[in-house]
């Protein structure tokens, strides 16, 4: 099986600056969570290689494998929610200026 790079695909795009944190300090905690979930996923896949490749030789029935698969699905869903939240923070607020607010 070919090995993939262990670098997180969004690592370069998620570098926070002090200005980012001044506008949305919660991004620091969310970035830590994403990194922790990424490392957790890598560790679970390393421990349960049969989740990557069903033909991978494993040592009998592992009752933890279905739980690892469940954790992987849930961490993926949480990371999607974090990314959606981050995108919502970057959208400009809707304009409140109407035609009646134009000063002329």
Image: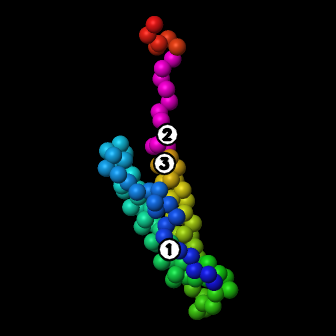
Position of 95 relative to 42 (above/below): above
Q: Are marks 1 and 3 in contact (CB under 8 Å)?
A: no
Residue 84, percent from left and from top: 52, 49
Q: Earlier in the sequence, mark 3 or mark 2?
A: 3
- Residue found at x 47% / y 49%: 86
* Res. 68 in view: no
Residue topped by disc 2: 91
In the picture of the structure, the residue carrying the numbered disc 1 is 6
For the record, the magenta segment spans 88-98
- Point out the tag, 1 or 3, that comes first from the N-terminus: 1
- Report if residue 99 is visible in the image: yes
Q: Is residue 93 magenta?
A: yes
The image quadrant that residue 68 belongs to is bottom right
Q: Eyeballing the image, is 61 above or below 34?
A: below
The quarter of the picture where the C terminus appears is: top left
The furthest residue to the right: 55
Numbered badge on residue 85: 3
Number of marks present in the image shown: 3
Asked if the magenta segment contains residue 90, the reply would be yes
> Crowding near pointer 1: few (<14 within 10 Å), some, many (20+)?
few
Q: Residue at x 48, y 70 (%)?
A: 7
Q: Which of 71 and 30 is in front in this view?
A: 30
Disc 2 to disc 1: CB gap under 8 Å: no
Query: Dot 3: what SS?
Result: helix
Q: Which colour scheme is used?
A: rainbow
| CA neighbours of label 2 inside 10 A, class few (<14), some (14 to 19), many (20+) | few
Q: Give the residue at the far top of this rendering.
A: 104
Q: Is the magenta stretch mostly helix, strand or loop?
A: loop
């Amino acid at each position: 099986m070919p090995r993939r790079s262990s670098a997180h695909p969004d690592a370069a795009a998620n570098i926070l600056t002090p200005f980012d944190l001044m506008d949305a300090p919660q991004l620091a905690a969310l970035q830590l969570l994403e990194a922790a979930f990424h490392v957790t996923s890598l560790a679970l896949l390393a421990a349960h290689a049969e989740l990557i490749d069903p033909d991978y030789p494993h040592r009998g029935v592992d009752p933890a494998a279905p739980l690892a698969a469940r954790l992987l699905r849930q961490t993926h869903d949480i990371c999607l929610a974090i990314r959606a939240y981050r995108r919502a923070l970057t959208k400009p607020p809707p304009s409140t200026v109407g035609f009646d607010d134009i000063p002329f």
